[in-house]
């Protein structure tokens, strides 16, 4: 019997026809929701080397090393804590240590391994391992730290008079000059009124650094994800930045959606997964490997050098001592860094530091090849490939020891000056 | 409340249900009017007062014009509207040049939200009354005409004689309207939130068109400028066409048909055709209310061409009182004049016309390239920036022409989106032909839920990356 001759009323058929598309869409979305609820994807760690451990190591979390903002939730495997910068003590020198994940992650972690800044602190305080000493170190490192984020953290470290840091030590990885805009949660720090006021003061002294000014203006306007308005550079406020009942209602609705529908709750993770998938396809299609050359785009480079200069100028103006080091590069070819990019950065960094009264160190050749490792062979996309970003515990010790050797004379001098100023 | 917010979906549902319960056109008009003002009020109280004042003035002036249809009365009405628009634009331009920003700029922008669009609607109403095309709206109908929320903030710019009769028709919310409306909304949000925003911001920060124009410290190569110009052209298209699609879809939910604003403009084979396909509601407004009256003041080709240039310059300045918008408008004016000259030459010398299959492609290239170049003027932050970018494009250095100053993902994303758009357009044309076949039509209909579900899935995944509609600032 043909379907068309079944005793189905035409009105029923009409209803079924009308409901088919919305019902089928609904069903597909329910299915997507079910699949999404099982998503276990952390955008922060998705492409991370499984051999990497991003934790304070050896109980350093319990030693009182504190960072300025949460990298991960307290109690998570990534046990870096969050607390407010403590009040600056007259008898001690407070040091803010900034770097990227190279400074807070260890490859093939072994018992007794510590991060480079932890080594630095322990050695400075004569092996006191975290007990209150003459040098109080705070870690403000961030995975993939960008120069705009370095600026924000430096400004944060100076924004409250009684908690102002005495010294900022920054390790700059050349790879960090590949991005510009700060990530949203760090840019949110710029909403603090004191931080905003400080950033506005940075704006005033950077008339000769137009690219840095554009980034700082973006920070001040909360414009880190701008839509590219025609007539770019406009100072118009974002009309999406609404306040009032509608915005509150929207926030409430978004919370409800996040709380009740996995598809909404996991949307960042889904986006991250799509992005990582795109990168995997791109790399496979174009034959991109971890060792493939990655020139630093000139526009990015120039903007970031201006941001470094803006940061160092600001610290100098605020009476904060600064030191910058060129972070270790894996000494093997093929290498993602262009030799001319390395040399250019070396020269430019020295030049900027000289201009801004900052002390510069070149540790680009500090860590030998045997202290670096590779991705596991079993890794689907980058199996067996070299990891150019992170090194082992022995390298952390080497870096920390070198930093202590180079910085101690300066830190002792600055501490003495501080104590004399307080008498 | 933005079109891309969850609150807007809730708002639409509530408004639709209330409208569905309305039995008469009058009640429905009141419901839509209240909804429109509530929608606008979510942006602040000041804009509501400006809108209400403008609506009341134009309604009263329309009545006066009906009673005394003289040029003087018309000119006075137009002048008041232009004065309102110009005062906000001038204040904006002045504050930008003086570096006044922050909350003052925000207040001004919010007050001006939608001003360009509803002011042009108001002026078209006055001119139509003068010309005798007067639908004689009641006060409520006129208030709704100017404030109708789907088109209030960024168009499409409607005409009173198209909208008022629809408000008067007996409300009959149909499945067809519901389906078409939802489909347009989903498509519009996908264009805006997934395509436009990805082009603007990149897949991750520092990889989008915005970075290339606003954050980069210059030093663009020929390749960079080409990709930035094409990327921005498509970003603007997806953003604005997406917004328009949501607006049209929202209106359609209530059985109200609003004029289209885009019709595959990048498939145009001449600048003239382009302007019948891009921001159609504004370009037709300029044609009907500026170009035609101007061009008929004097006979002759020269005056006609001058009128064209003046009209397009006004088009540019509508976007903002800046030198770059002025130059952009002038550029398009001269482009249209040049096209007319070439058309005239082709008519006189048909031997110059290549074979059809070549002619089509060549015409498309000679349309797409200058349109794309024009976007540099439209988007650049200053004349200096526009000059530097055009120089990199038109006078490349031997060494740096093909160097890439942006991250590789930028070039990949622009290429994929642009090529994808042309493939999609070809696919749509193919689907249209397939729909003539009954079996093929059923199969396509059967598979359509996959398309909608995938679009919604991606819209949700991209939603935490939301950004402003570009045309909000006009």
Image (tube, coloured by chain):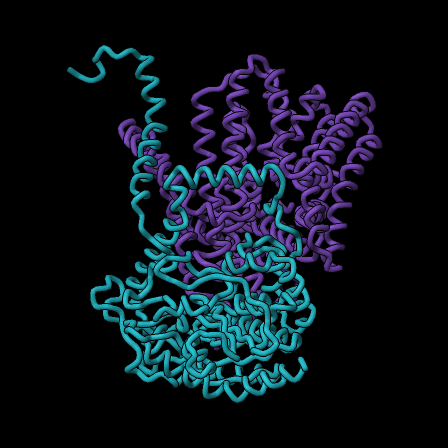
- Dividing the picture into quadrants, the one containing residue B392 is bottom right
Image coordinates for residue B160, horizontal then vertical, percent: 66, 27
Image coordinates for residue A131, horizontal then vertical, percent: 46, 74
Image coordinates for residue A305, horizontal then vertical, percent: 55, 75
Query: Is residue B301 in view from this perspective?
Result: no
Query: Which image quarter holds the C terminus of chain B?
Result: top right
Q: Which chain did the image draw in purple?
A: B
Q: Is residue B364 above or below residue B66?
A: below
Instruction: Give the residue displayed 41% in from the left and 66% down from the top.
Output: A62
Is A382 on the left-hand or right-hand side of B395? left
Is A29 on the left-hand or right-hand side of A309? left
Query: Which image quarter holds the N terminus of chain B?
Result: top right
Q: Which chain did the image draw in cyan?
A: A
Q: Is residue A225 above or below residue B242?
A: below
Is B74 on the left-hand or right-hand side of A250? right
Instruction: Give the residue displayed 54% in from the left and 62% down from the top.
Output: A84
- Decide which of B455, B158 is in the foreground and name it: B455
Furthest toward the left, the residue is A1
Instruction: Give the residue displayed 56% in from the left and 45% down from the top.
Output: B469
Count all numbered tags in the image, as a single digit.
0
Image coordinates for residue A30, horizontal then vertical, percent: 32, 35
- Decide which of A100, A228 is in the foreground and name it: A100
- Dividing the picture into quadrants, the one containing residue B112 is top right
- Decide which of B440, A69 is in the foreground and name it: A69
Query: Is residue A384 in view from this perspective?
Result: yes
């Amino acid at each position: 019997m043909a379907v068309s001759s079944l005793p189905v009323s035409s009105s029923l058929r009409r209803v079924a026809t009308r409901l088919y598309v919305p019902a089928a869409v609904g069903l597909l979305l329910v299915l997507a929701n079910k699949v999404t609820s099982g998503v276990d994807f952390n955008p922060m760690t998705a492409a991370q080397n499984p051999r990497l451990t991003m934790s304070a190591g050896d109980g350093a979390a319990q030693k009182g090393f504190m960072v300025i903002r949460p990298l991960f939730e307290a109690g998570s495997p990534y046990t870096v804590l969050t607390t407010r910068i403590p009040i600056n003590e007259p008898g001690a020198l407070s040091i803010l240590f900034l770097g990227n994940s190279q400074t807070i992650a260890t490859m093939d972690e072994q018992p007794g391994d510590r991060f480079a800044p932890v080594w630095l602190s322990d050695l400075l305080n004569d092996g006191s391992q975290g007990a209150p000493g003459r040098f109080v170190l705070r870690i403000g490192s961030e995975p993939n730290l960008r120069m705009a984020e370095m600026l924000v953290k430096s400004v944060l470290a100076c924004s409250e008079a009684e908690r102002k840091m005495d010294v900022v030590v920054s390790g700059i990885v050349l790879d960090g000059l590949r991005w510009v805009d700060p990530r949203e949660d760090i840019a949110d720090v710029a909403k603090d009124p004191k931080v905003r006021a400080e950033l506005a003061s940075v704006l005033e002294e950077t008339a000769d650094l137009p690219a840095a000014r554009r980034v700082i203006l973006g920070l001040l306007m909360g414009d880190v994800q701008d839509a590219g308005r025609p007539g770019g550079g406009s100072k118009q406020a974002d009309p999406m930045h609404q306040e009032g009942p509608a915005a509150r209602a929207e926030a409430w609705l978004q919370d409800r959606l996040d709380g009740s529908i996995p598809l909404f709750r996991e949307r960042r993770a889904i986006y991250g997964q799509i992005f990582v998938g795109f990168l995997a396809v791109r790399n496979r299609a174009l034959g991109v490997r971890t060792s493939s050359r990655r020139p630093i785009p000139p526009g990015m480079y120039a903007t970031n050098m201006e941001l470094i200069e803006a940061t160092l100028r600001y610290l100098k103006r605020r009476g904060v001592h600064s030191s910058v080091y060129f972070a270790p590069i894996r000494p093997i070819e093929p290498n993602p860094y262009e030799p001319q990019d390395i040399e250019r950065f070396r020269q430019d960094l020295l030049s900027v530091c000289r201009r801004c009264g900052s002390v510069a160190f070149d540790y680009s050749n500090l860590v030998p090849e045997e202290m670096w490792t590779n991705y596991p062979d079993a890794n689907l996309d980058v199996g067996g490939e070299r990891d150019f970003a992170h090194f082992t515990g022995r390298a952390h010790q080497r870096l920390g020891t070198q930093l202590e050797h180079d910085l101690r004379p300066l830190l002792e001098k600055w501490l003495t000056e501080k104590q004399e100023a307080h008498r | 409340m933005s079109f891309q917010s969850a609150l807007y979906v809730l708002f639409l549902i509530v408004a639709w249900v209330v409208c569905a319960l309305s039995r008469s056109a009058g009640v429905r008009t009141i419901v839509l009017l209240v909804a429109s003002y509530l929608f606008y009020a979510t942006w602040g109280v000041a804009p509501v007062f400006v809108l209400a004042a403008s609506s009341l003035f134009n309604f009263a002036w329309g009545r006066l014009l009906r009673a005394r249809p003289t040029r003087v009365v018309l000119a006075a009405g137009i002048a008041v509207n232009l004065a309102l628009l110009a005062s906000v634009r001038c204040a904006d331009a002045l504050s930008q040049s003086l570096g006044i920003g922050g909350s003052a700029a925000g207040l001004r922008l919010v007050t001006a939200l939608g001003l360009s669009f509803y002011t042009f609607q108001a002026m078209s109403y006055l001119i139509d009354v003068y010309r005798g095309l007067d639908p004689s709206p009641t006060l409520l109908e006129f208030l709704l005409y100017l404030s109708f929320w789907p088109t209030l903030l960024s168009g499409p710019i409607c005409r009173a004689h198209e909208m008022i009769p629809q408000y008067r028709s007996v409300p009959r919310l149909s499945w067809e309207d519901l389906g078409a409306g939802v489909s347009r909304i989903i498509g519009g949000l996908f264009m805006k939130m997934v395509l436009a925003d990805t082009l603007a911001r990149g897949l991750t920060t520092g990889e989008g068109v915005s970075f290339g124009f606003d954050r980069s410290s210059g030093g663009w190569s020929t390749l960079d400028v080409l990709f930035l110009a094409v990327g921005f052209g498509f970003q603007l298209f997806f953003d604005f066409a997406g917004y328009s699609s949501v607006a049209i879809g929202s209106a359609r939910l209530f059985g109200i048909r609003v004029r289209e604003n885009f019709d595959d403009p990048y498939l145009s084979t001449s600048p003239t055709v382009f302007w019948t396909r891009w921001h159609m509601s504004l370009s037709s407004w300029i044609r009907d209310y500026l170009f035609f009256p101007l061009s008929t003041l004097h006979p002759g080709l020269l005056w006609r061409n001058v009128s064209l240039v003046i009209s397009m310059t006004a088009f540019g300045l509508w976007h903002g009182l800046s030198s770059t918008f002025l130059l952009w408008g002038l550029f398009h004016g001269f482009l249209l004049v040049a096209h007319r000259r070439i058309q005239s030459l082709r008519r006189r010398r048909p031997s110059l016309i290549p074979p059809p299959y070549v002619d089509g492609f060549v015409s498309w290239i000679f349309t797409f390239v200058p349109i794309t170049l024009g976007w540099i003027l439209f988007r650049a932050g200053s004349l200096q920036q526009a000059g530097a970018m055009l120089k990199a494009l038109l006078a490349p250095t031997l060494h740096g022409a093909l160097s890439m100053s942006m991250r590789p993902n930028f070039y990949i994303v622009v290429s994929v989106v642009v090529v994808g758009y042309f493939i999609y357009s070809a696919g749509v044309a193919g689907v249209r032909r397939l729909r003539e076949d009954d079996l093929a039509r059923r199969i396509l209909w059967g598979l359509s839920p996959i398309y909608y579900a995938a679009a919604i899935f991606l819209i949700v995944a991209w939603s935490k990356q939301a950004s402003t509609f570009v045309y909000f600032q006009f």
